Image: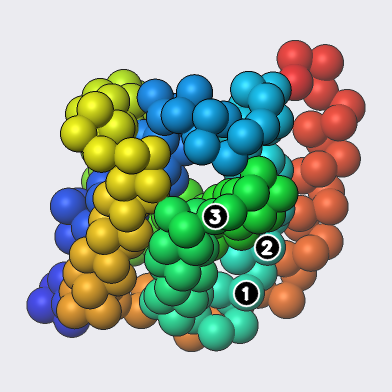
């Protein structure tokens, strides 16, 4: 039983890579914002919207992928999200105007949001008690470091290449992550999914709305 459980449990390294990629994708290209504005002949305010629209796409993805993973499985959902991310990252690199870049950033964030929601879902599927607390603590530490790593890498890339090079780096990162997931990401979805999930979520939402601290 222990060997079977180990076989169906993602490694800590895989979990960390998946969950930090969205954070790095958010910040890695931020040093290139002035270069983007100049290259696409637009204003800095419009270019800065590529940061805001990333959060919108990410939020919608977080609200969407969880339910999808209950139907088609965690692994399949993660692979689909990574594929969307890779395609949109590559298209970002060849954007010809700010509207195209804004649209693609939305779908880029939507795809890579699986790194947050699916990874946390898989951790809850596989771990419990003290082991879950240790895993979440380790992941939380890397989540704190990821926003600082992104601009450092992005600054180095834009220094030696054009801003499009930042999105090429994200594309290659997504490809490596997809290959890693294809080889090592197991399916962790429980055989039985509660049919009361929607009711529980609505109840939780109601409690959050009524909580004065929140």
From the image, state whether disc 1 or disc 3 is nearer to you: 3
Looking at the image, residue 156 sits to the left or right of residue 146; the answer is: left
Residue at the limit of the structure toward the top, as seen here = 213
Q: Position of residue 11 (x, y in %)?
A: 18, 60
Residue 20 x/y as whole percent: 34, 42
Q: Tell me whether circle 1 and circle 2 mark residues in contact (CB < 8 Å).
A: yes
Category of crowding for the residue at label 3, using alpha-carbon neighbours closer than 10 angstroms: few (below 14), some (14–19), many (at least 20): some
SS of the residue at dot 2? helix
Determine the residue positioned at 83% across, 48% down: 203
Label number found at residue 64: 2
Image disc number at residue 95: 3
Please tell me how crowded label 1 is: few (under 14), some (14-19), or many (20+) other residues with Cα within 10 Å.
Answer: some
Within the image, what quadrant is residue 177 found in?
bottom left
Is 31 situated left or right of 207 in this image? left
Residue 75 vertical position relative to residue 176 in the rendered view, above or below: below
Quadrant including the C terminus: top right
Q: Residues within 10 Å of mark 2 (few under 14, many from 20)?
A: some
In the picture, the quarter occupied by the N terminus is bottom left
Of the two numbered discs 3 and 2 in the rendering, the one whose residue sits closer to the viewer: 3
């Amino acid at each position: 039983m222990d060997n079977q459980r180990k076989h169906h449990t993602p490694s800590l390294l895989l979990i960390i890579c998946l969950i930090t990629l969205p954070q790095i994708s958010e910040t890695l290209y931020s040093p290139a914002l002035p270069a983007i504005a100049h290259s696409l002949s637009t204003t800095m305010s419009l270019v800065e919207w590529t940061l805001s629209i990333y959060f919108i796409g990410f939020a919608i993805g977080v609200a969407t992928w969880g339910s999808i993973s209950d139907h088609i499985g965690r692994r399949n959902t993660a692979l689909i999200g990574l594929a969307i991310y890779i395609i949109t990252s590559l298209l970002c690199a060849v954007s010809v105007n700010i509207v195209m870049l804004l649209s693609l950033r939305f779908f880029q964030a939507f795809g890579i949001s699986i790194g947050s929601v699916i990874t946390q879902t898989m951790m809850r599927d596989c771990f419990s008690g003290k082991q879950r607390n240790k895993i979440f603590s380790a992941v939380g530490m890397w989540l704190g470091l990821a926003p600082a790593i992104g601009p450092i890498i992005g600054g180095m890339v834009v220094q030696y290449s054009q801003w499009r090079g930042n999105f090429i780096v994200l594309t290659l990162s997504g490809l490596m992550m997809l290959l890693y997931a294809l080889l090592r990401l197991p399916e962790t979805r429980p055989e039985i999914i509660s049919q009361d999930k929607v009711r529980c979520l609505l109840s939780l939402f109601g409690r959050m709305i009524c909580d004065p601290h929140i």
